[in-house]
Amino acid sequence: MIIPIYQVDAFTDRIFCGNPAAVCPLGYWPSDELLQQIASENNLSETAFIKKRDDLFEIRWFTPLTEVELCGHATLAAAHVLFNHLHFKGNRLIFESGFSGKLEVTRNNDLITLNFPADQVEPALPPDHLFESLGSRPLEIWKGKTDYLIYYPSQEDIEEITPDFGKLQTVEARGIIITAPGYECDFVSRFFAPKVGINEDPVTGSAHTTLVPFWAHRLNKLKFEARQLSYRGGNLECQLMGKRVLISGHACTYLTGSINLASALL
């Protein structure tokens, strides 16, 4: 059994930046165990598996440890592969996820836009070990569907945080988003998710479904330029449209190849 694999750097216009994701097109769905083994072997923050069905593409996302409900950068990477390598005709495609429903993706030249459901955030009390694990006290704490959003007053606060990932792993949430106003953009952020096997994610599209509604209320605007301040860094263009968030970015192919599963199936 041979599975094609593409590794794509998402939310960047040059390789070695942004967030790398693996994309594996499938002819049928193998077992969940095999999908997880492939994602673990890839050892990237996300592997997206896609399969054509009628006029749409089924999609699933796996970290090295678990399947997740939504992933922005791997969806952008999957769209990039379809548009640039698998000869998809047109500038609009639909992914369908069992967790997040139908997700529209469009292309304008080389800019790819994800249309994702907006998260709802509510003020929250600090979970156990949060302050210890981040090493500083934020101004505000909010909670979305799966993640905590932690607000700080300045970009320097975001840049200087060095989490204790062992303690952060005990926080009951998919991930921790930290954010502040940006100097050269509307807001900056970082994303930590040791609970699902990712200490710090380089660029997290799905986190912006939480960030954009939060900043729309705070800044009284709907369109944003955002930057994630990981060691690789990434840029995103975002827009709030009612109960949806548009998240746009570029992508670059780093490698193409194939996965040989012959020995695994013996």
Image (cartoon, helix red, strand yellow):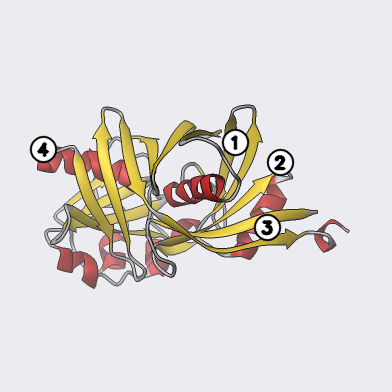
Dot 2 alpha-carbon crowd within 10 angstroms: few under 14, some 14 to 19, many 20 or more: few
**Residue 220 circle label:** 4
Q: Amino acid at mark 2?
A: Trp
Q: Marks 1 and 2: in contact by CB < 8 Å?
A: yes
Determine the CA span between mark 4 and mark 2.
44 Å
Circle 3: residue type: Gln
Q: Secondary structure at mark 1?
A: strand
Which numbered disc covers residue 29? 2
In the rendering, which numbered label is found on residue 136?
none
Q: Residue at x 84, y 63 (%)?
A: 263
| 81 relative to 4 in the view: left or right | left
Mark 3 is surrounded, within 10 Å at the Cα level, by few (under 14), some (14 to 19) or many (20 or more) other residues, namely: some
Cα–Cα span, label 2 and label 1: 10 Å
Which of the labelled discs sits on residue 37, or is there none? 3
Does label 3 or label 4 sit earlier along the sequence?
A: 3
Q: Residue 32: x and y, percent? A: 68, 46
Q: Secondary structure at mark 2?
A: loop
Residue located 53% across and 50% down the image: 84
Say which residue label 1 marks: 58
Is 133 placed above or below 38 here?
below
Do residues under tags 4 and 2 come within 8 Å of each other at their CB atoms? no
